[in-house]
Image (cartoon, rainbow, N blue to C red):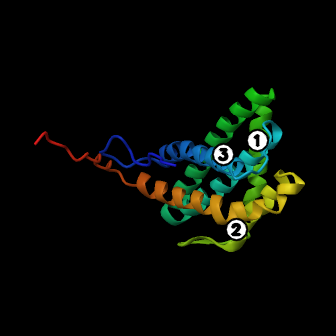
Amino acid sequence: MRIKSSWFKSGREHTPAELAGALSFVIYRIADNALKNTRNAKFEIAVGPQYFAFLTEFLLFQVQVADRIAYRRLSAEDRFTFTSTLANRIAETHAENESRLLSGELTDCKRRFIDRLNQRFDEYAEFGYGESGPDFSFTRYLAFCMEQVMDDKDSWWIIDQMMSIEAPEAVEMLEKTFRNLLESEPRQPRRRASTSGD
């Protein structure tokens, strides 16, 4: 999956809220891609509540990852602004999609997401995340949460899918995107090698 992870305009540092806005879009794309990959790997995820339960857990995991990266890269004040903005942006997008497709109240959907996020913050706080990324327990907790989402026949196998494939790919993309977004200068566009008629 290719993701645009640099700013279009140069000349200034971007605020924590702007970083959060850009990253929220990326996080939702990564979660959607993880869902597609998991379904392509022959896991049954029914359209409806199960579909949104999967997306919810993967989004919550990524918010934890983004917050841990922010801990390393931003001041305490900027980290608070960043994570608060990120959580609200993702909650709003997720609630809009869920309320539209499952006919729920937008405010209820957002409140449920934020409540679950706060719960997950307490739970993931037990696990480490260093320069090399999340420790085993951090990623294993995502797999545990996904076990609860899947049907019985898939619940055991989802552990390997999350720990070996989806979580590492998501972490790698988030680390790279965050690093690129902190650069104030946009990257130079790649130039195609020109061909001549000679």
**Front-most of 16 and 46?**
46
- Residue for badge 3: 36
Residue 66 at x, y = what percent? Answer: 58, 57
- Compared with residue 187, is residue 162 higher up or lower down, i.e. above or below? below
Residue type at the position of mark 3:
Lys
Label 2 to label 3, Cα distance in Å?
23 Å
In what element is the residue under mark 1? helix
Q: Nearer the viewer, mark 2 or mark 1?
A: 1
The mark found on residue 138 in the picture is: 2
Residue type at the position of mark 1:
Phe
Query: In this image, 190 relative to 40: left or right?
Result: left
- Compared with residue 10, is residue 125 higher up or lower down, i.e. above or below? below
**Front-most of 166 and 52?**
166
Mark found first going from the N terminus, 1 or 3: 3
Label 2 to label 1, Cα distance in Å?
22 Å
| Mark 2 surroundings within 10 Å by alpha-carbon count, few (fewer than 14), some (14 through 19), many (20 or more) | many
**Front-most of 122 and 188?**
188
Query: In this image, 1 relative to 128: left or right?
Result: left
The mark found on residue 52 in the picture is: 1
Look at the numbered discs 2 and 3 and tell me whether their residues touch, using CB distance below 8 Å: no
| Mark 3 surroundings within 10 Å by alpha-carbon count, few (fewer than 14), some (14 through 19), many (20 or more) | few
| Placement of the C terminus among the 4 image quadrants | top left
Label 1 to label 3, Cα distance in Å?
13 Å
Residue 161 at x, y = what percent? Answer: 70, 60
Residue positioned 32% across, 48% down in the render: 186
Mark found first going from the N terminus, 2 or 3: 3
Q: Is residue 68 visible?
A: yes
Q: Is residue 125 visible?
A: no
**Front-most of 15 and 169?**
169
Q: Residue furthest front?
A: 198
In what element is the residue under mark 2? helix
